[in-house]
Image (tube, rainbow, N blue to C red):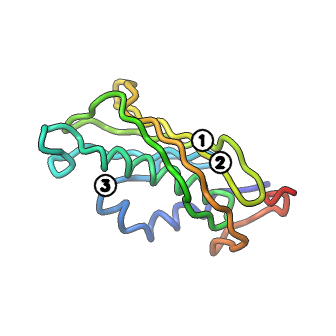
Amino acid sequence: MKSANHLPGLAERDTFSRMMGIKLIEWKVGKVVTECTVGKDHLNFNGTCHGGVLFAVADVAFGFASNSHGIISAGINVHMVYPAAAREGDTLRATAIEASRSRRLATYQVEVTRQDGEVVGLFTGTVFVTENLHDGAAVEKSVHRK
């Protein structure tokens, strides 16, 4: 059975996530949830949450989900839309789900919501799947399909 139990160790080493206040909340192979509370330092000149913060919370979920198989994967393409605003004090929750995976490419969809359930970000990302394993990851051979 595959396990994503190596992800908390990766999160501990992720200084960017820590600096942004992004936390790993839930994880399993192919699905990850991250959260971040919008603070004063996350606001843009309009007084709303900066799009870069929304992107970051989605990108972190995408990064952990794409590496949840225990194989080092690197983002090669992303796209994001921002259908609604977030404000100071809002809790952002990014849920990344694996949409497709082949031997060398995998695609993920990430939805970012506020605490009221309103969608504030929709993110799609593709990764290149390497042949290198993460330290401490338990990997099944079937992860690399033909």
Q: Rounded to the nearest whole Å, what is the CA distance between mark 1 and mark 3?
A: 21 Å
The location of residue 143, given as percent across then percent down, is 79, 58
Give the image location of residue 94, x and y in percent: 45, 41
Secondary structure type for disc 2: loop
Q: Residues within 10 Å of mark 3 (few under 14, many from 20)?
A: some
Q: Do the residues labelled 1 and 3 touch (CB within 8 Å)?
A: no
- Residue highlighted by disc 3: 21
Q: Are marks 1 and 2 in contact (CB under 8 Å)?
A: yes
Q: What residue type is labelled 2?
A: Gly
Height in image: 70 above or below 24? below
As drawn, 68 above or below 39 = below
Q: Left or right of 27: which side holds 123?
A: left
User: At 57% across and 63% down in the image, what residue appears?
Assistant: 74
Which residue type carries mark 1? Ile
Decide if residue 88 is on the left or right side of residue 109: left
Instruction: Say what secondary structure mark 3 lies in.
Output: loop
Instruction: Name the residue tied to disc 1.
Output: 97
Q: Is mark 1 on a helix, strand or loop?
A: strand
Of residues 107 and 7, which is closer to you in this image?
107
Residue 122 numbered tag: none
**Separation of marks 3 and 2 at Cα, in angstroms:** 23 Å
Q: In which quarter of the image is residue 96?
A: top right
Find disc 2 in the rendering and name its residue: 30
